[in-house]
C-alpha cells in the first residue's frame, strides 16, 4: 500500500482559504456602527455655519455686519474677558 500525502495539502489549502474570511470578519467587527455622534456633530456644524453666514449678512445701522462688530469688540478691548463679554452681548441680541 502507498501512503497518501493529500492530507497535508488539504490542511494547508484550508488554512490559506480561511485567511481572507478571517480578515473580512476582523474588518466588519472593527467598523463603527454607532453613527449618532458623527450625525449630531455634522448637524451642529451645519447650524453653526448657517448662523455665521446669517451674522455675516446682517448689517446694523452703522453699516457693519454683526461679525465685524464682534471682531471690532474683541480687537479693540485690551482685556480679554471684557472683550468676550461685550462680544457676547452683541451676539445675544441676534
Image (cartoon, rainbow, N blue to C red):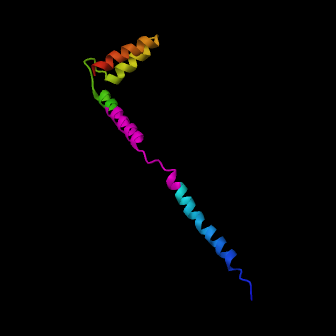
Task: Tell me which segment is drawn in magenta.
Answer: 27-50
Magenta-drawn stretch contains 31: yes
Residue 18 occupies which quadrant of the picture? Answer: bottom right
Question: Horizontal placement of 66 versus 10: left or right?
Answer: left
Q: Using residue 56 as the reference point, say whether residue 11 is left or right of it.
A: right
Q: Main secondary structure of the magenta part?
A: helix
Residue 15: give x, y in percent of width and height: 63, 67
Image height check: is 88 above or below 32?
Answer: above
Query: Residue 30 location in percent, x, y?
Result: 52, 50
Q: Nearer the viewer, residue 80 or 62?
A: 80
In the picture as drawn, the residue positioned furthest to the bottom comes out as 1
Residue sitting at the far front: 1
Quarter of the figure that contains the C terminus? top left
**x and y, in percent, of residue 72 in the image:** 39, 17
Task: Name the residue located 38 percent from the left edge and 35 percent from the top edge.
Answer: 45
Percent x, y for residue 86?
37, 13
Who's the residue at 35% across and 38% down the image?
Answer: 43
Q: Nearer the viewer, residue 4 or 16?
A: 4
User: In percent of the image, x 46 and y 10: which residue is there?
Assistant: 79
Rendering quarter of residue 19 = bottom right
Which residue is at a point 64% across and 75% down the rendered structure image? Answer: 10
* Quadrant for the N terminus in the image: bottom right
Observer-nearest residue: 26 or 63?
Answer: 26
Between 57 and 90, which is closer to the camera in this rendering?
90
Q: In this view, does 67 lie to the left or right of 27?
A: left
Q: Is residue 86 magenta?
A: no
Amino acid at each position: 500500500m502507498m501512503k497518501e500525502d493529500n492530507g497535508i495539502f488539504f490542511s494547508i489549502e484550508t488554512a490559506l482559504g480561511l485567511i481572507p474570511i478571517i480578515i473580512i470578519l476582523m474588518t466588519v467587527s472593527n467598523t463603527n456602527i454607532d453613527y449618532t455622534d458623527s450625525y449630531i456633530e455634522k448637524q451642529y456644524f451645519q447650524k453653526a455655519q448657517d448662523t455665521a453666514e446669517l451674522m455675516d449678512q446682517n448689517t446694523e445701522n452703522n453699516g457693519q455686519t454683526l461679525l465685524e462688530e464682534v471682531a471690532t469688540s474683541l480687537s479693540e478691548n485690551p482685556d480679554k474677558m471684557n472683550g468676550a463679554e461685550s462680544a457676547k452681548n452683541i451676539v445675544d441680541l441676534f
